Amino acid sequence: MLNVWVVMPTCLPTVLRRCPACASNRFRANGKFRVNAHHKLLDAWLLVLCTACGDTAKLTVLERVNVRSVRPDLLDLMHNNDPGLAAELLQDPVVQRRNRIALDWDNAWRLDTGGSDHLDREVIDVSVRFAARIPVRPVRLISQGFGVSRAEVERLITEGTLVSAVRLSGRLSCDFTFTLKR
């Protein structure tokens, strides 16, 4: 039987970008937008706050875009400061590249294993699903899911009792499966 584990975000990630007002490089997104119109052109920003000094920075979402080319539902979500849209835009590679930011997901996600009834089986097949693109080390997920140390997971990989089609070292943010043979 295949067990499904889900990596779920618990809050918006920390934005890594240098603050122009202080020496900090961490910003907190609160899901607020600013939309500005210049005749028939729109600018839209996602506002983020410096964790050290509280200074506000703007992450460009739309820049000098014709009003007619913006979907009305997207504009409504920005006017209503939708946190789901903020989360989606923070993970958008185009927005990240345009604003030269990176995301720090520490303490912003959790692993839902669906219970521990699978731990006593001889062969355990697990499918790990990501609700958002959260880069996490598979060794960390497996150790957290089974309640063992990371060193123990590394030992199981070395012995060949923990196998996967993907490389379990490094970071992953896409779905994968693995099998544990006891």
Image (spheres, rainbow, N blue to C red):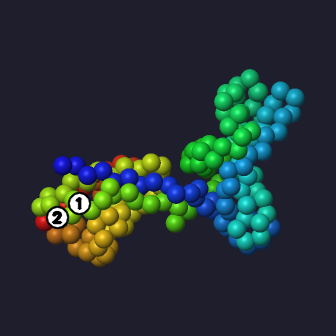
Q: For the residue labelled by badge 2, is the local secondary structure a helix, a strand or a loop? A: loop
Give me the residue at 22% from left, 67% from top.
157
Regarding residue 137, the answer to whether it shows in the image is yes
Decide if residue 67 is on the left or right side of residue 27: right
* Res 78 quadrant in image: top right
Give me the residue at 44% from left, 60% from top.
110
Give me the residue at 86% from left, 33% from top.
38
Decide if residue 4 is on the left or right side of residue 87: left
Give me the residue at 71% from left, 56% from top.
48
Residue 61, horizontal then vertical, whole percent: 69, 42
Decide if residue 93 is on the left or right side of residue 79: left
Residue 3, horizontal then vertical, whole percent: 26, 52
Given the current orientation, which residue lies at the most extreme right position? Answer: 39
Is the C terminus in the top left, top right, bottom left or bottom right quadrant? bottom left
What's the residue type where badge 2 is placed?
Asp
Q: Which residue is mark 2?
A: 120
Q: Evaluate if marks 2 and 1 touch, with contact meaning CB atoms under 8 Å apart.
A: yes
Q: For the residue labelled by badge 1, is the local secondary structure a helix, a strand or a loop? A: loop
Between 153 and 118, the residue placed more toward the observer is 118
Residues packed near mark 1 inside 10 Å, few (<14), some (14 to 19) or many (20 plus): few
Mark pair 2, 1: CA separation:
7 Å
Residues packed near mark 2 inside 10 Å, few (<14), some (14 to 19) or many (20 plus): few
Q: Which residue is mark 1?
A: 117
Regarding residue 163, the answer to whether it shows in the image is no
* Res 169 quadrant in image: bottom left
Vertical position of residue 85 compared to residue 122: above or below:
above
Decide if residue 175 is on the left or right side of residue 132: left
Given the current orientation, which residue lies at the most extreme top position? Answer: 68
What's the residue type where badge 1 is placed?
Asp
Residue 119, horizontal then vertical, whole percent: 21, 64
